[in-house]
Image (tube, grey):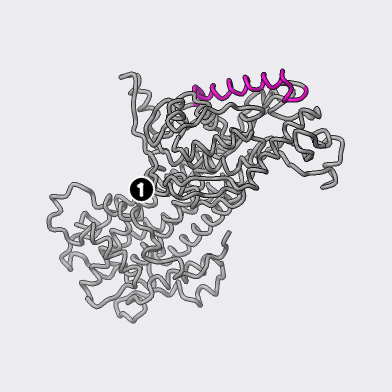
């Protein structure tokens, strides 16, 4: 499930030197492309610009679901486009249209009505040249995971309903998504103040320039369009601005992050329930009186969730061998995991807002009037008021330059989640180590004749592997240093580095799954030891389900282990990625989360 995240980060951050050295030696290096499947191609998701969900992004990005625009969203986009054209007829200056962008913001690109014969011909030629230029733009390596590119396309299709895109651009973006045409996008062409570079590559595909993938096969974009019966786009007006002025490359990956992180957190809870049983732990830290003494909603929710998850376990019965207090990593894991859930929930809320609103410059507001707020009726803002005329079907509004491209609400929450996840992982890593000590377990593995604890048993997890993974996770949790480099003659002087932040967060989630796999191997190994001690012991329905399921791929005592070629870690992490945590413990078995957005 998260292999794509690993591949992206390794490709973008770790393999650059390898690519360059290989090309120097052999002239070229072809890495494998990882296409999405089309298992949901019969499903159509209606985009309104207001209620696109993370799950729907995943359905389109990974499973080929189709998209359509609601009538209201399509009309909103058409109205914005009409207001843009009307602005030129009224002599209103519009950033990145009849005026330049960036350092050229005061340069007049043209004067007068955009639809006059002279201006129309100039804009058609100008836009086509800009779109075609996207084929050679950007910094590689190319993105090799189709789900990332498809995710950024569907997010942009949804948010672009707020922008002044031509109706033909709006339709062209829908068409390539539904046809299975995926642009070749270069991964490192954004600093986070708008993902201009990656979407410039998308521009090229729409007009049939450069290369694209059609159902996973690379070919010229022209051939891909022809293969599906689509005609190259004839861009017009401010279509380049309407498409590329966005953070949808980052926010789309953040949507994939939110989806995958929920799976990882669900598995972390199941692994914790297994560890509690394997350690013969005291459940007093999770009990209601303890939680009532510190009523943090997410902590209380998670403690109740864990109590429910291990309901029916022998931990609720007296055991004279059970110690009064576990290691801190066992006692505090619920707190760490609850805090990671809380950070995830905040990130989810932010992503949900980000993928359902405009992050474009300029902002087009059809229907806004000088009477709406006092500042709109001042001489400065009235300069950007479009009174309405034939091009806009009489509709009025404002077109205002802005800083809505700044994604800091999103990237701050991405980094906060990464840090919370790493703090959760610290407890998981420590738990694995605690199982190697009879001081905590109260049982000697050697006495049970099942091998040395923590050292290469037929089905044991490895504290060594957990430590190695934690070193990677700790490095990923270090925030990316803030950056402000003056670009484009000092006009663009802030960078958010959203690509780095979301890539690191996705890799942290993937590494967390690897860590959980080691924890599952350790915890389930100790479930078997507890059963050897007392065969009638019960662990609860959810824990037992995971334990028995894992045993189908990782037997407890495989006498033929020397003949195996696949590591038990790969089997365990494959088991995690092949199963939804909710298949063992449904969400309905827990109380509702403290906040639902």
Q: Name the residue tied to disc 1.
A: 469
Residue 66 coordinates in the image, percent (x, y) = 48, 45
Residue 16, quarter of the rendered image: top left
- Place of residue 435 in the rendered image (x, y in percent of width and height, measured from the top left): 30, 62
Front residue (pair 269, 32) = 32
Looking at the image, residue 180 sits to the left or right of residue 296; the answer is left
Task: Judge whether residue 385 can be spotted in this image.
Answer: no
User: In the rendering, at what x and y percent does residue 181 appear?
Assistant: 45, 35
Is any part of residue 592 visible from this angle? yes
Foreground of the two, 504 or 70: 70
Residue farthest to the front, as pictured: 229
Left or right position of 197 against 382: left
Seen in the picture, residue 137 relative to 147 is either above or below; the reply is above
Q: Secondary structure at mark 1?
A: helix
Which residue corresponds to the image point at 52% horizontal and 68% vertical from the top-left?
A: 592
Residue 291 located left or right of residue 325: right
- State the image quarter where residue 583 is shown: bottom left
Residue beneath the point at 43% across and 75% down:
284
Which stretch appears magenta?
112-138
x%, y% of residue 312? Answer: 35, 77
Number of disc labels: 1
Quadrant of the image containing the C terminus: bottom right
The residue shown at (61%, 33%) is: 484
- Mark 1: give few (<14), some (14-19) or many (20+) Cα within 10 Å: some
**Is 136 one of the magenta-colored residues?**
yes
**Residue 62 within the segment the image draws in magenta:** no
In terms of secondary structure, what is the magenta stretch mainly?
Answer: helix
């Amino acid at each position: 499930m998260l292999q794509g995240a690993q591949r992206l980060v390794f490709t973008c951050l770790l393999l650059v030197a390898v690519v360059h050295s290989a090309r120097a030696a052999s002239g070229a290096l072809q890495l494998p492309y990882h296409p999405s499947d089309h298992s949901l191609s019969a499903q159509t998701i209606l985009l309104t610009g207001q209620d696109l969900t993370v799950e729907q992004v995943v359905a389109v990005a990974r499973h080929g679901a189709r998209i359509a625009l609601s009538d209201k969203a399509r009309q909103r986009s058409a109205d914005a486009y009409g207001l843009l054209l009307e602005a030129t007829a009224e002599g209103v200056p519009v950033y990145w249209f009849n005026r330049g962008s960036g350092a050229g913001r005061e340069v007049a690109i043209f004067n007068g009505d955009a639809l006059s014969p002279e201006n129309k011909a100039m804009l058609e030629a100008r836009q086509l040249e800009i779109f075609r230029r996207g084929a050679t733009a950007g910094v590689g390596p190319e993105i090799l995971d189709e789900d990332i590119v498809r995710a950024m396309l569907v997010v942009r299709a949804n948010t672009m309903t707020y922008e002044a895109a031509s109706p033909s651009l709006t339709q062209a973006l829908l068409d390539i998504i539904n046809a299975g045409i995926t642009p070749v996008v270069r991964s490192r062409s954004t600093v986070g103040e708008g993902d201009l570079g990656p979407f410039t590559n998308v521009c090229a595909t729409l007009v049939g320039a450069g290369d694209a993938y059609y159902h996973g096969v690379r070919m010229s974009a022209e051939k891909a369009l022809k293969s599906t019966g689509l005609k190259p786009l004839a861009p017009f007006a401010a279509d380049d601005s309407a498409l590329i002025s966005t953070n949808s490359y980052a926010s789309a990956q953040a949507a994939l992050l939110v989806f995958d992180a929920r799976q990882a957190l669900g598995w972390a809870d199941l692994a914790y329930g297994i560890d509690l049983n394997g350690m013969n732990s005291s459940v007093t830290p999770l009990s209601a009186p303890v939680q009532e003494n510190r009523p943090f909603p997410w902590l209380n929710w998670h403690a109740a969730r864990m109590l429910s998850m291990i309901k029916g376990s022998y931990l609720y019965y007296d055991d004279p061998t059970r110690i009064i207090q576990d290691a801190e990593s066992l006692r505090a894991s619920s707190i760490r995991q609850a805090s990671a859930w809380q950070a995830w929930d905040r990130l989810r809320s932010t992503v949900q807002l980000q993928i359902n609103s405009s992050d474009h410059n300029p902002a087009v507001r059809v229907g806004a009037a000088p009477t709406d707020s006092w500042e709109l009726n001042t001489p400065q803002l009235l300069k950007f008021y479009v009174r309405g005329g034939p091009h806009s079907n009489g509709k009025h509004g404002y077109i205002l330059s802005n800083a809505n491209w700044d994604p800091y609400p999103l990237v701050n929450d991405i980094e906060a989640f990464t840090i919370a996840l790493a703090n959760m992982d610290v407890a998981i890593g420590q738990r694995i180590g605690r199982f190697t000590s009879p001081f905590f377990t109260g049982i000697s593995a050697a006495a049970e004749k099942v091998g040395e604890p923590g050292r290469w048993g037929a089905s044991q997890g490895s504290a060594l592997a957990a430590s190695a993974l934690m070193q990677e996770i700790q490095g990923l949790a270090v925030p990316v240093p803030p950056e402000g480099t003056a670009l484009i003659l000092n006009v663009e002087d802030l960078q958010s580095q959203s690509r780095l932040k979301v890539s690191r967060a996705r890799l942290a989630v993937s590494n967390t799954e690897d860590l959980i796999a080691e924890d599952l191997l350790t915890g389930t190994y100790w479930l078997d030891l507890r059963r050897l001690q007392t065969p009638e012991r019960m662990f609860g329905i959810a824990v037992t389900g995971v334990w028995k399921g894992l045993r189908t791929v990782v037997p407890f005592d495989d006498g033929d282990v020397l003949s195996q070629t696949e590591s038990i870690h790969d089997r365990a992490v494959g088991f995690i990625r092949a199963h939804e945590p909710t298949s063992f413990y449904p969400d309905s078995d827990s109380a509702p989360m403290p906040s639902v957005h």
